[in-house]
Image (spheres, coloured by chain):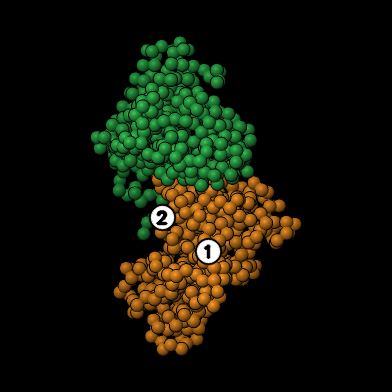
Chain colours: A green, B orange
Amino acid sequence: MRTDISTSTLLEMQRRMTRIRRFEERAAKMVKRGLIPGAVHTSIGQEAQVVGACMALDDDDYMTGNHRSHGHPIGKGSSLGPLMAELVGKATGVCRGKGGSLHLADFSVGSLGESGIVGSSIPIAAGSAFASKILGRPRVSLAFFGDGAANQGVLYEAMNMAGVWKLPVIFLCENNQYALSTPAHTVTSGDIFERAAGFGIPGVRVDDGQDVLAVYDAVKTAADRARSGEGPSLVEVMTYRFNEHSEGLRIDNYRDKEQVGEWLRRDPLDYLAARLRDRGVTDEHLKALDAEVMDEVDRAVEFANESPYPEPSVAFEDLYTDEVTAV
Amino acid sequence: MSVMSYLGAIGAAQREAMEADERVVIMGEDVEANVYGTTGGGKSRSSEGDFLQLFGRNRIRNTPISEEGIVGIAAGAAMTGLRPIVDLSYSSFLYMAMDQFVNQVAKNRYMFGGQASMPVVFRSAMFYGLNTGAHHSDRPYPMFMNVPGLKIIAPASPEDAKGLLRAAIDSDDPVLAFEAVKLWGLKGEVSDEAFRIPLGVARTARKGTDVTLVAISGSVPDACAAADRLAEEGVSVEVIDPRTLVPLDTTAILTSVAKTGRLVVVEPAHRTCGAAAEISALVAEEVFDALKAPIVRLTAPDMQIPFSPSLEQQMYPTRDGITAALRRVTGLKPA
């Protein structure tokens, strides 16, 4: 475990995890009230895995996400206002209201976008790593994908090319143990991280993915390796989503209540809060941090609510870079 | 000007683009060995013009047989600073990468509100009419015309192959290039200068006044030959090669049919929802009043492609078939 991480960095980790938690709690409420249309998948419970990975990257490093991806741009430093406006479908949304919860992208923080198709954005991350290598820029790319995507063939096509070309890319499997309702172990042969060995690249598993520092360590090692030209790594992080697969979905027959209760007690925010207290950070300080984030979320919602909906003509823009229009 | 083959023109365009811009890279199966003749001067590494010698493996590299991964990696690279040309060899191989084409390449710019640009060209060859069997004979460009966000070129002459490919490489949007193998050996005058043919501008291959014949890709030489035959009989056929299928030069087609009052469309793809169907519908909607005869489509039937030469021959529109259709719509007696 790294001991050289400053308290201010730990506080920033706590802040980013709290931003994800409060943002998504609010989004879930808004879904319930019908204020956010469409499907919303939260990463509540998985914040350590998201923030540990994002903070192990540099600001201009690239990453791609998946359907459960509000946390990724937040973890990388996005402003909450345009993200919330996007969830609501407003003109000021980060994707002008054309992406929504399933397609957030914030290129200003290196977020190359989420994919609603499981596994589909993995080669996009590898491609950005390919460009970095060919253009000689010292950037690293990271693909976030779940245990479900670990059974998509395109992951292994990308891993093979990344391995043989020594691309600076990290394949990060967020193993929350269920592909919707299907337990990963019932559809996955062997351990996911061990598949890296078949490609001659390092594969590690972070068993306690609720510990942001454990995730940070593993991803930092992979990022340093990638940046020094040694190629890709696979990092599997064991974690758990606290909410349902998507908001509004109610299926309680596939996760054991005891198991859920056990994981709810392993809250990544509490985990890091305890470490911060060990370093002498006061409860007041932590409460103030939470209040600041709550205020930031309030302002983001306010921004989203006060923003106009996009003009209908916006639906016909951004298909091409030039003036070619729909027939 | 030089006389160049269709394939040579593609090679010339690729070399020019590679020399002009370091962000242009070529990737694909067997590109280093110049297997298909568009990435080098000859089949020997020592031949003058060998791309690997000229540009090094950073700029031209073989890929594994992983079409979905290749297309996705090219897309990600295009979104972050490279301008890849991907050689997918056979057009039938595009299906392996359908998710990447449809969900990433075509949608990323749109879904992300214009944050992404996707300057990438995907080249593939249609090996139809060469007894390659059902897995290698596809002409799948109409499927991709149905995917908003992709641009599609289908050049039918050496000059167009060079000029359109240069324009495609310049484009900040994804372009799919469909090249008919039966055109590979076609020779023609091509400018030695770097030139571009803008996407979305049709070429009028023959000027005429009695009937408009829109021909696509490998059907263009047959269409021109049929037009020449009719000219001898006093029928003036206007042959239009759209060259680009997305965006389609609708003005050129509509203006011509408004003038001639008759339309025959010929292409090697399947009938249902083909480019010919789209062009016919467009004309029926926009210039119906000008029509003096029913529109005629000449296409491959909605049937798979058989292997045996004796079976395959009948599957695509022929010069004689086009001639007969032109006679029919102009009221001439069959020859």
Which image quadrant: the N terminus of chain A? top right
> Is residue A231 visible from the viewing direction of this image?
yes
Residue B287 is tagged as none
- Image location of residue A157, percent across then percent down: 55, 46
Query: Toward the viewer: A164 or B254?
Result: A164
Q: Is residue B48 left or right of residue B244?
A: right
Image point (58%, 53%), residue name: B65
Task: Identify residue for label 1.
Answer: B135
Q: Earlier in the sequence, mark 1 or mark 2?
A: 1
- Counting other residues with Cα less than 10 Å from the Cα at mark 2, is it few (<14), some (14-19), or many (20 or more)? some
Query: Toward the viewer: A96 or B195?
Result: A96
- Image location of residue A175, percent across then percent down: 46, 34
- Image location of residue A132, percent across then percent down: 58, 40
Task: Identify residue for label 2.
Answer: B148
Q: Are marks 1 and 2 in contact (CB under 8 Å)?
A: no
Image point (48%, 40%), residue name: A188
Q: Tally the marks.
A: 2
